[in-house]
Amino acid sequence: MALLTEERVRRMSDNGTRGPVVVRREDVLTPSARSWLREHRVEVVYPQGETGREAGAPASPKYRTLFGASLEEKPEHMTHLRGNLLVFKDHPRIAFRGMIDLLEGEIALCQQACVRAGVPALAEELEEVLDFVRRFIRFDVLEEPVGEVRLCGLGPGELRERSHYPEKYYGQGHFLLHYTDSPALLAVNKVRTVVRQTELAAYRAFRDENGAVTREDILLGLNRLSSLMWIFMIRLKAGAYGPPAGGAQ
């Protein structure tokens, strides 16, 4: 099974020459990929015999559900969990993917705010964060491990340590947010809160009936990402990216 993004289907279509895109039944097309295929009228074809059926055997259903139903058409109130497996759109895994989408949008807006506030260096650091966040859909859909978490040169232990004891590392202690803080600092804080919401959505998506978590790696990655956002705020407040970020003393 593969996650087919817009960038990937563009390459599969010979860089825009409108060649057909071959998609296996178990592959997952992202919404942006589907939109691009429709907009450019690119034909989607499925390999013959890829389901492994014997000649003359009855066709297998196009979709299946968690509760054992077989469907030929996808209802509007359902969506893909993986491959041709459909779930209701309020399924916790789908809600988690929606939070990842929201988080990507907030990071991009934060980058824009940082550039406008005169701290483009932070906008560049956030590009690494955005790349990390975009991979979470793949971690979920393809059930791939997150692997080593290292953000802006810091590992999990370092991120936790520095976010807990910022004065030791940055000469700036913990502080309360204030409306006079810079737009960049306020924007980073908004990203931090969305990361926290995404972490809660991940817990709901990957916990079992006893509360145990099946994807500790995803929760760890998001938790340390939240720590990094606080470190960014501390550094902004301390003036590491330029003049101090203001705020009530």
Image: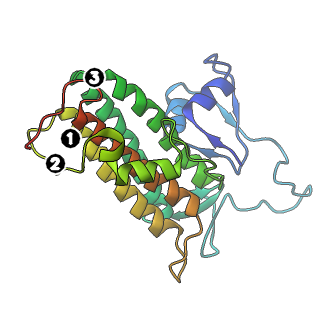
Above/below status of 246 relative to 116: below
Closer to viewer: mark 3 or mark 2: 2
| Residue 125 rendering spot, x and y as whole percentages | 42, 30
Task: Please name whichever residue, 133 or 176, is drawn nearer the observer in this view of the structure.
Answer: 176
Q: Give neighbour class at mark 1: few <14, some 14-19, many 20+ (Cα, 10 Å).
A: many
| Residue 233 rendering spot, x and y as whole percentages | 28, 41
The residue at the point 56 percent across, 47 percent down is 149
Q: Name the residue under label 1.
A: 186
Q: Mark 3 points at which residue?
A: 115
* Residue 75 appears anywhere in the view: no
Residue 7, numbered circle: none
Looking at the rendered structure, the kind of residue marked 3 is Val
Q: Name the residue under label 2.
A: 177
In-image side of 147 versus 79 (left or right): right
| Residue 38 rendering spot, x and y as whole percentages | 52, 32
| Residue 198 rendering spot, x and y as whole percentages | 40, 56
Earlier residue among tags 3 and 1:
3
- Callout 1: SS: helix
Cα separation, mark 3 vs mark 1, equals 13 Å
Looking at the rendered structure, the kind of residue marked 2 is Leu
- Quarter of the picture containing the C terminus is top left
